[in-house]
């Protein structure tokens, strides 16, 4: 069960050619209406460790925060993180102030370049991200409607089985543990898939063919399970 759970999380990071072979539900409504190619490319470069100097800090910092959250409360973790940042910034500010006094320079605040940066969100940016959120909500609401209102009985039964399995997953792990496992898988399994892509595609392809054959046989024997033809 643990193995399939990890594979499920990693499936979101695999190539688009691999995803259709393992996804149990295939609904156009489940797909977001739009996606930024540039944003997707930068994420792919991170999870495939194209530049370890960029990927390692992202992976390690988030993992450390998740580990801290598993041992301390959210408020404590946030407070300690901000205290650590302030310790660094105050120490650096004091150091630069002393150096400026010794060298008799008037450079001012060493963080002035960052203080002068415009951090406000424009109306266009807010509308852009709001539209993306709405697109995802609409897509997933259509997917849930398809499953919960039994538009296709076979797909709804698959979803019910997944939910039943998740009850066992929830009994074995808490939410934070699953998030940590997902984060580790996100940065490890794509590399494994990239290295052994041919073997994995071949094995998954065979399994997918067998599953489709079984489902087709069931639909043949039970006609009322067939999807209504438009």
Image (tube, helix red, strand yellow):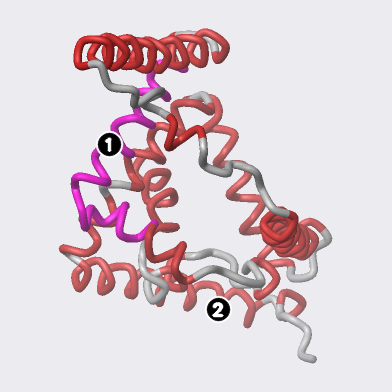
Residue 159 occupies which quadrant of the picture?
bottom right
Q: Quadrant of the C terminus?
A: bottom right
Q: How many marks?
A: 2
Nearest the camera: 52 or 178? 52
* 19 relative to 230, above or below: above
Question: Residue 156, image x and y in percent?
Answer: 70, 60
Nearest the camera: 61 or 98? 98
Q: Please give the residue where the numbered disc 1 appears in the rendered image.
A: 57
| 56 magenta-colored | yes
* 176 relative to 13, above or below: above
Q: Residue furthest bottom?
A: 230
- Magenta range is 43-69
Kindly state the secondary structure of the residue where label 2 is placed.
Answer: helix
Question: Measuring 66% from the left and 51% from the top, which residue is drawn there?
Answer: 160
Give the distance between the C-alpha atoms of the residues marked 2 and 1, in whole angstroms. 50 Å
Residue 220 occupies which quadrant of the picture?
bottom right
- Taking the image as shown, residue 224 lies to the left or right of residue 166, namely right
Question: Residue 213, image x and y in percent?
Answer: 47, 78
Q: Are marks 2 and 1 in contact (CB under 8 Å)?
A: no
Residue 2 occupies which quadrant of the picture?
top left
Q: Residue furthest right?
A: 149
Specify which label sits upstream in the sequence, 2 or 1: 1
Q: Please give the residue where the numbered disc 2 appears in the rendered image.
A: 217
Camera sees residue 35: yes
Residue 101 marker: none
Nearest the camera: 23 or 227? 23
Question: Measuring 62% from the left and 69% from the top, which residue is drawn there?
Answer: 31
- Taking the image as shown, residue 130 lies to the left or right of residue 63, namely right
Question: Residue 127, image x and y in percent?
Answer: 74, 59
């Amino acid at each position: 069960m643990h193995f399939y759970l990890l594979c499920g999380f990693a499936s979101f990071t695999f190539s688009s050619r691999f995803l259709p072979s393992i996804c149990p539900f295939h609904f156009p409504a489940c797909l977001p209406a739009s996606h930024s190619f540039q944003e997707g490319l930068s994420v792919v470069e991170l999870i495939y460790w194209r530049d370890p100097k960029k990927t390692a800090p992202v992976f390690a910092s988030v993992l450390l925060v998740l580990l801290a959250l598993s041992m301390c409360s959210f408020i404590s973790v946030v407070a300690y993180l901000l205290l650590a940042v302030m310790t660094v910034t105050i120490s650096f500010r004091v150091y630069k102030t002393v150096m400026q006094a010794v060298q008799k320079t008037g450079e001012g605040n060493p963080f002035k370049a960052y203080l002068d940066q415009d951090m406000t969100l424009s109306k266009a940016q807010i509308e852009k991200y709001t539209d993306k959120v709405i697109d995802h909500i609409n897509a997933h609401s259509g997917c849930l409607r398809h499953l919960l209102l039994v538009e296709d009985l076979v797909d709804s039964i698959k979803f019910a089985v997944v939910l039943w399995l998740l009850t066992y997953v929830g009994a074995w792990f808490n939410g934070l543990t699953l998030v940590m496992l997902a984060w580790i898988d996100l940065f490890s399994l794509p590399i494994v898939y990239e290295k052994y892509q041919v073997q994995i595609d071949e094995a998954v392809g065979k399994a997918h063919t067998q599953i489709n054959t079984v489902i087709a046989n069931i639909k043949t024997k039970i006609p009322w399970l067939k999807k209504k033809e438009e």
